[in-house]
Image (tube, helix red, strand yellow):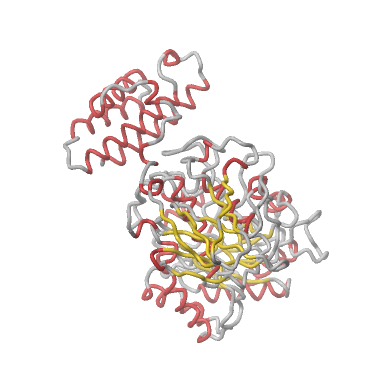
Amino acid sequence: MNMKNNAIILCIAFLVFACMYQMNASSPLSAMTSPVELREKADRVRDLLRAKKERGEDVAESEKKYRRSVTAFRSRDMDTADRLVEELLRELSGPVTKADASPEKKDARTSGIEETKNKSVRLNLPLKAAYMVSLKPRYQKGKEITSPDGEGAFDVAPLALKDGAVTVPLTAQPVFILEEQPRLPLTPARLSESSPFGLHPAKVEDIENPYQYATDIGVSWHRPAKYFAWILVQTDIAKSAYDWSLFDSEIRQVPPGMNLLYNIIVAPPASSHQKDIFEKAKKKGLDLEKYIRKDSYLPVNNKAYTAFVTACVERYDGDGIDDMPGLTSPIKYWQVGNEPHPKIADFAEFVKITSSAIRQADPSAKVVLGGAFRIVMESRSNFERAFIPVIKELQGKYIDIIDFHWGSNAQGNYRDYKDIYSYLRSELVKAGLSGDTPVWITEMSTYSGDPVKASSQPWDPPYQSEGMQAGDLIKRYVYGLSIGVEKIFWAWGLMEGFHGNDTYFDHTGLMYDGKFSSDEGRGVKKLSYYSYKLMTSLLDGSDWKRVETVVDGKDNIYVYRFTKKESGAKVYVVWWDYFRE
């Protein structure tokens, strides 16, 4: 077991123990160090071990002690675990004090280059006045922002204009420059179908108002976690009866005006070699073989499946005919499947039969092609082999919108898909689609914390601070809009938690879920929560087809201009890719 895995396990153990402690205040440990202090000390040990190992120091004995502390936690021997961690702290850095372990003490990993770098740039901007708005640089974590409306998260400062130019002080965080001084607290962006701002998903589970955070930060589009799956709705194919209760309940919670993009599938596709998938489904009462062909996306019974699709779209299209009772948030955008796998056949044919059934029920509905895997987008050869053939087979029909997925580190990955995006545009025309066919990214991401490397992941995600995620989020949206991407959905989720194993997508959310490493507690907002709100509030009402590039990387500076549709007012977004210097 490597050092990183040891560290992750230890941090998880501390989190589990913290929950146990709160349930049993009479624990003997209550007279010792508090759970919060233990967690802070565990993080410090982790940092010290990593730093020493990177310097080439021999930490083999300390790692053994780490493993013993993990064993102690697993057996709930908290006294031993606490003693071992204290010993490690003394050995690695000297005695630890209460002040060292205080939650107010800055995490050593957050005081990196993204905080200390700064640069000033002189820009010629046609403005009569200039106000710069950004996240306050002194905040290293979202938990430090205590104002209920988040007003304290933002800095508004006037900039001096001289000879038609303005000098902009830059740090790691993107800044917004406006002609009129914005009022704090920021007004949430309005819900709008034209808005490019989405989340997959925007719903937070297990709270009274599951969309309160999405509306607070200006999210207009929700791609739900639960797909419309035929196998879930028609449990007996011999009977033309559908159980819509699960989805009716979901859609009733959606606030009016929130736009929905729903995926629709037959059932989870699987190859004949993946026998465990079929076995697991059977244990849950789902017989996949009755619904979907092995090694294929196609249904076993086309007629029954297309009848389901037609009934589904009719129920939620909002036309007043056979609609769900009380429907206030109709579904006008349907995504057929997701991430077509090159080893599973017939995806294009599946799209054809599904799209035809959707349009039969609702001719005004828009059909979105299931998004391309990120790994497919990374290589032109993969893209040509796995995704372009699907588009060509559709012959310019059946779909209205193309989708792909992207995400990785906060060190410039936000712009690494430019060439493959340009290639995609050229191939759309060759395939018979319009050159201006909308392209969406329904899964866009970077992360905070230190995720565990998944077995299927080709790279080991390094630690990233909340500030790195917050700044990169803005770049990912603004850059995408500047090259013509129409809508972007952050994934996974407003709140963390996807695979449930501390890997990449368990760290991409804008709020913590109270689990795993680098976690500040369920419901605690990250800095990225506030950067999302800042972005949507200040860009609300822009002409999204008129996003202009003013400076494209000269001296690693990037400047983009947005124009408000009604007033014509300009908003500039400026950043410096400090990590390239």
Q: Closer to the camera, 108 or 497?
A: 108
Q: Where 52 sits versus 372, above or below?
A: above
Q: Residue 365 location in percent, x, y?
A: 70, 71
324 or 532: nearer the viewer = 532
| Residue 290 drawn above or below residue 380 | above
Identify the residue shown where x is 46% and y is 38%: 519
Tell whether 224 sits left or right of 44.
Answer: right
| Picture residue at 23% right of the left edge, 43% below the top | 54
In this image, 458 relative to 160: left or right? Answer: left
In the displayed structure, would residue 417 be above or below residue 190?
Answer: below
Q: Position of residue 317 (x, y in %)?
A: 75, 65
From the viewer's perspective, tell me whether residue 229 is left or right of residue 501.
right
Q: Quadrant of residue 35?
A: top left
Question: Which quarter of the rendering shows the N terminus?
Answer: top left
For image coordinates 35% across by 30% down, the residue present is 42
Residue shown at the point (48%, 82%) measured from the top left: 427
Which one is in front, 463 or 368?
Answer: 463
Residue 429 visible in this rendered orientation of the protein = yes
Viewer-proximal residue among 407 and 527: 527
| Residue 444, horizontal then vertical, whole percent | 50, 59
Q: How many marks?
A: 0
Please identify the residue farthest to the front as the structure is shown.
163
Residue 290 visible? The answer is no
In this image, 577 relative to 57: left or right?
right
Quadrant in which residue 435 is drawn: bottom right
Quarter of the rendering occupied by the C terminus:
bottom left
Residue 363 position within the rendered picture, expressed as x and y whole percent measured from the top left: 73, 75
